[in-house]
Image (cartoon, rainbow, N blue to C red):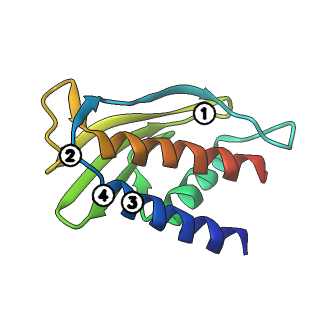
Amino acid sequence: MKGKLLAVLSIAIVTLALTGCPHQADVYNVENASIVANIANVSAADVRKAIIRAGGTLGWNIKDAGPDRLEGTLHLRSHVAKVDIPYSPTSYSILYNDSTNLRYDGTKIHSNYNGWIQNLHKAIQVQLNTL
């Protein structure tokens, strides 16, 4: 039930974000976010599963990209965002990798991108809290 509600809310947020006035902002990265969970010994596998579940609820395609590293891709109409997600039992990051039709210029990007990353970060935290 919570998963479906989160998915519906996420779709609504993304829809609202896409209809707003487009402008550029500094690229938002999540760097070394601490793992907060309800269990004492969180494994890297637990973190991996939480990230994949979180991304799935928001429409991200999350796949393995090497040891303790995932790659997330979000397709919204003609827009594509790609992020690298390194993780460990104690932290994770969400780092810009590539994009299409988001006006990335090396430091700035369409501001909707930042909202998508913030939503992914929050969704990962929710999933980690269910451990």
What residue is rendered at 18% in x and 46% in y?
102
Residue type at tag 4? Leu
Dot 3 and dot 4 residues touching (CB under 8 Å): yes
Who comes first in sequence, dot 2 or dot 1?
Answer: 1
Assign a secondary structure to mark 4. Answer: helix
State the image coordinates of residue 34 (x, y, percent, origin top left).
Answer: 66, 28
* Disc 2: which residue: 99
Dot in front, 3 or 2: 3
Q: Is residue 38 left or right of residue 2?
A: right
* Disc 3: which residue: 16
* Disc 4: which residue: 18
Task: Give the quarter of the image for residue 24.
Answer: top left
Q: Residues within 10 Å of mark 1 (few under 14, many from 20)?
A: many
State the image coordinates of residue 103 (x, y, percent, origin top left).
Answer: 13, 41
Assign a secondary structure to mark 2. Answer: strand
User: In 3D space, how far apart are the residues under numbered discs 2 and 1 (Cα atoms)?
Assistant: 25 Å
User: In 3D space, how far apart are the residues under numbered discs 2 and 4 (Cα atoms)?
Assistant: 16 Å
What residue is rendered at 69% in x and 34% in y?
35
The disc placed on residue 88 is 1
User: In 3D space, how far apart are the residues under numbered discs 3 and 2 (Cα atoms)?
Assistant: 20 Å
